[in-house]
Image (cartoon, coloured by chain):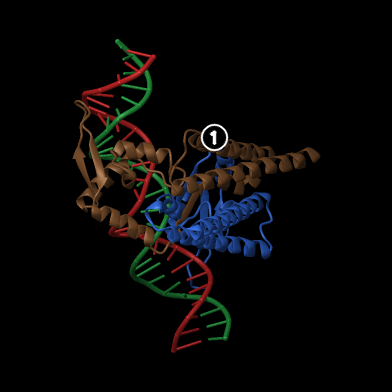
Chain colours: A brown, B blue, C red, D green
Amino acid sequence: MIALGKRTGYDIKQLVDRSTKNFWAASYGQIYPELRRLEQEGLISGRSEPTGGRARTVYELTKHGSAALRDWLAEPPEVIFEVRDESMLKLFFSDFGPPEQRIELLREMRRSHEQTLDQLHSLEADGGPQKLGPRLTLELGLGLNQWIADWCAATEERLAADVDKE
Amino acid sequence: MIALGKRTGYDIKQLVDRSTKNFWAASYGQIYPELRRLEQEGLISGRSEPTGGRARTVYELTKHGSAALRDWLAEPPEVIFEVRDESMLKLFFSDFGPPEQRIELLREMRRSHEQTLDQLHSLEADGGPQKLGPRLTLELGLGLNQWIADWCAATEERLAADVDKE
DNA sequence: AGGTGCATGTAACAGGTTACATGATTAA
DNA sequence: TTAATCATGTAACCTGTTACATGCACCT
């Protein structure tokens, strides 16, 4: 994030929440200690730029830092893809509950993905990312969430029809 | 998993790896301590059923256990959906590397999702899940991975065309 | 005789969240 | 004046992985 421009810890958190959040989140409890670690390693350097009487440390990449970034990008991409989805776990075990509960769950899943979809759309609406990388991840996010929401909707209907039959 | 039938810790691990792995993984380091915790809480009970001289503890649900399962299913579904995808993070920052690297990354992402797809297909091939819940999650998994793989393929082509133009 | 699968377990570590604490600045 | 936003930071906790250790059973 610092490679995209000088940033405070606070800035980074805001940016993450509006960009990578859906596939790589971060909390202050992670960011601030990490900034210190990166500075110790010489990958970033911070300078104090207070706003009035308010402390404020702005970080920027060092040469070592941007080299490290390029190295990381060049690493053979060993795809790390982890998902934890409690609602899908509930869907898996939904046979132990009444059929209506399963439909309700699907409805809630759809709602949740539609909400994410709205957020992504509003992001797109106000300018949207300029760089290709961020643009592609946004596109992927939109498509993915749309697909899931559609699947939920279709499955809701299918199951509702089955319940009615009885 | 124990609700689906009596199981040892080892059994659970095998089953998880062939079913919920892609949206809810588990390791032995989690399973065995958890079995002990659940037994202490009276939700499951284990009995020793050795195979020859080999120790073996089989667990089954208690009444409290199946009530707890139903309670959990009945909870208002507060959708917890977390993703950590390093390759998508790389895609996000891919502007800091050469364009070919981005295409290579996409290719690797596609390969990885196609591999998952193969696993899911072979699961489907040998019988596949009988219950509706597991069947639905399998269906979702197949669709999702297929969608991502297709998106990657399409994007690869699009970007390759852009690179050629220069 | 040896490899694979069954079976159990733990200690050390890594990664990350939550909750809390503090306080200045700015817009309503 | 008061609420929201900017800004920093940490301690306790939780969840989960990795790596290791052990040993029997079964098939070839």
Callout 1: helix, strand or loop? helix
Please indicate whether residue C20 sits to the left or right of residue B119 in the image: left
Q: Estimate the x, y position of residue B79 in percent, counting from the top left.
A: 53, 39
**Whether residue B116 is visible:** yes
Q: Residue furthest front?
A: B166
Neighbourhood count class around disc 1 (C-alpha, 10 Å): few under 14, some 14–19, many 20 upward: some
Residue receiving disc 1: A118
How many numbered marks does the figure carry? 1
- Of the pair B50 and B9, the residue shown nearer to us: B9
State the residue at coordinates (43%, 46%): A131
Q: Quadrant of residue B14?
A: bottom right
Q: Residue furthest right?
A: A165
State the residue at coordinates (72%, 42%): A159
**Whether residue A93 is visible:** no
Q: Vertically, is A45 above or below B18?
A: above
- Of the pair B29 and A65, the residue shown nearer to us: A65
- Of the pair A19 and B69, the residue shown nearer to us: A19
Q: Vertically, is A21 above or below D3?
A: below
Q: Estimate the x, y position of residue B1 in percent, counting from the top left.
A: 56, 53
State the residue at coordinates (56%, 50%): B61
Please indicate whether residue A5 sits to the left or right of residue A114 in the image: left
Which kind of residue does numbered mark 1 sit on?
Asp
Please indicate whether residue B112 sits to the left or right of residue C14 in the image: right
Please indicate whether residue A122 sits to the left or right of residue A37 in the image: right
Q: Estimate the x, y position of residue A60 in percent, counting from the top left.
A: 26, 45
Q: Chain of mark 1?
A: A
State the residue at coordinates (29%, 53%): A66
Q: Estimate the x, y position of residue B117 in percent, counting from the top left.
A: 59, 60
